[in-house]
Image: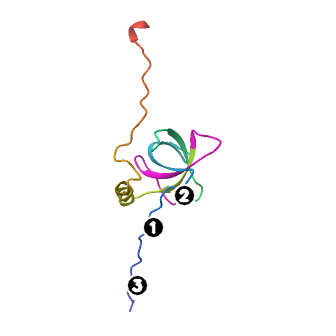
Amino acid sequence: MSKKRPKKNNTKELIFKDDCQEYGQILKMLGHGRCDILCIDGIQRLGVIRGNMRKKKWVKINDYVLVSLREFQDNKCDIIGKYTEEDVRNLKAYGEIPTEIETEEVEPLPFDFNDI
């Protein structure tokens, strides 16, 4: 006879950002634990997945993550956490993440194929 084990409570505490941290959304996976991330402050950065997250927490495009900003490299950051869909809803309810992320649109270079 086997006894039934009680179910584990898998709820975890919601982690808010601290100083030198930012929320971001993954735009593109680049390979080798790197990805393009659009941070909430409107800057697109190269994100590096932290070593203890590799092969334990899988991230994909459009996932929201918590990143640690580098003091010496503004265009790079380290991914230190991943948020579930429920966590993202809670962060939006608290006003931590805006419902629409504003991006800095870059104007395309004027190029005409007739000039060739």
The span shown in magenta is 56-76
Q: Residue at x 47, y 58 (%)?
A: 16
Q: Earlier in the sequence, mark 3 or mark 1?
A: 3
Task: Look at discs 2 and 1 and give the one toward the viewer.
Answer: 1
- Label 2 and label 1: CA atoms lie apart by 18 Å
Is residue 32 rendered to the left or right of residue 83?
right
Is 111 drawn above or below residue 21 in the view shown? Answer: above
Residue 105 magenta: no
**Which of these two is toward me, 110 or 39?**
39
Q: Which residue is mark 3?
A: 5
Query: The residue under label 1 is which amino acid type?
Result: Glu
**Which of these two is toward me, 57 or 82?**
82
**Which quadrant of the figure contains the C terminus?**
top left
- Label 3 and label 2: CA atoms lie apart by 29 Å
Residue 68 magenta: yes
Looking at the rendering, which quadrant does residue 89 occupy? bottom left
SS under mark 1: loop
Cβ atoms at labels 3 and 1 below 8 Å apart? no
Q: Residue at x 62, y 40 (%)?
A: 73
SS under mark 3: loop
Q: Which residue is mark 1?
A: 13
Q: Does residue 21 appear in the picture of this structure?
A: yes
Q: Which mark is residue 53?
A: 2
Residue 106 at x, y percent in the picture: 44, 27
Label 2 environment density (alpha carbons within 10 Å; few <14, some 14–19, many ≥20): some
Q: Earlier in the sequence, mark 2 or mark 1?
A: 1
